[in-house]
Amino acid sequence: MIPTPDLSHLTDQDKLYVYDPAEDTFLFLDALEQDAEDLKSQKPLICLEIGSGSGCVSAFMGSILGSTNTLYLCTDINNRASDCTHRTGRCNKIPLDPITCDLAHPLSKRLHHSVDIILFNPPYVPTESEEVLSAQSDRSISGSWAGGTDGMEVTNRLLGDVEALLSERGKFYLVTLERNNIPEICERMFRTFRLQCQVRVKTSDHLELTSARS
Amino acid sequence: MVRLITHNLLACHVKGCTSNNFPLALKDIQIELREAEFNPEFITNILPRLEWHALADAARQVGDTSLPPEQPEMMDDDLLRNLHHVLLEIHIVEGAMTCPNCKHIYPILNGIPNMLLAEHEIG
């Protein structure tokens, strides 16, 4: 049993602006814990979390893989989230390196086929398209859940970049809802990039997918 | 904190800025040193994913001259320890990173690099 990261340093003020870990976060941790032995044997050097929010998932990954074996890069479009991620890393003695940016844009040139693990718990709740645009440009907490049409607008922007980032044996973890049309995501990732998807953990309304090279 | 390992992986991503957009030049920076546990295997394995010249240059810009300008073929313990210090123990707390090509400025505040772009700069 790997302990859930200590998030006691998050203040009420932080939680107004940054997503407080909830059921989907814990599902994510379950999936990673289930794969812990495989993940360790893969000896990942670079782990990249997109939209790290509180930093809970990357800190958990750090307790699986060890604080000195892997570089934990964490991006978020919300600067307050980057700050929370950084503090969560310090609080749990896992060095998390936060970067405030959209998806992985400033890293894509240098991390071409170099990322061993990509973690993404995207904003997946179906909303109006306008809502996703304003939520992302406001860098507000609604950016952590507003997903636009089918809840897929932000995820779709990342899916096209995943293959170029993943290393030869890299793995991509994605949290989704049934309503996001999972068979379509899997089919598209295989058809376009030859990435094979698997459902790892399932609850009544959340799913955890892994995508890896076939 | 922007460690030099992270700096070595960031490039300018302004629309149309695709060449000579790495490494970002460090400007007006303040650094802090924080001890980290030494893991020689990690340093050895991560090195092929890094760009030596950019790293040695960045180290010099923050006042550390322990890395030779060219990557030595053989890694000894001293060199691995110097690399460990440069990559993982030097933290940029304040300052900015500037694109050598388009001169875009990315600020670093409270140890966090802000790589966001304005709407018209997004590719």
Image (cartoon, helix red, strand yellow):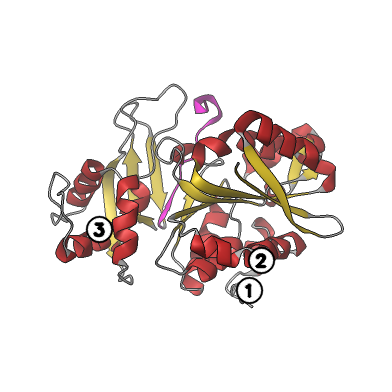
Alpha-carbon distance for marks 1 and 3?
Answer: 31 Å
Q: Residue at x 68, y 62 (%)?
A: A31
Q: Taking B100 as reference, is B74 above or below it? A: below
Q: Where residue A192 appears, x then y in whole percent?
A: 64, 29
Q: Does the magenta stretch include residue B117?
A: yes
Could you tell me which quadrant the N terminus of chain A lies in?
Answer: bottom right
* Tag 2 residue: A34
Label 3 resides on the chain identified as B
Q: Which residue is drawn at 56% across and 29% down?
A: B119
Label 1 resides on the chain identified as A
* Tag 3 residue: B86
Q: What residue type is labelled 2?
A: Gln
Q: Taking A12 as reference, is B21 above or below it? A: above
Q: Are marks 1 and 2 on the same chain?
A: yes
* Tag 1 residue: A4
Closer to viewer: mark 1 or mark 2 = 2
- The extreme front residue here reads A214
Which residues make up the magenta segment? B111-123
Q: What element carries label 2?
A: helix
Query: Sequence-wise, which precedes: disc 1 or disc 2?
Result: 1
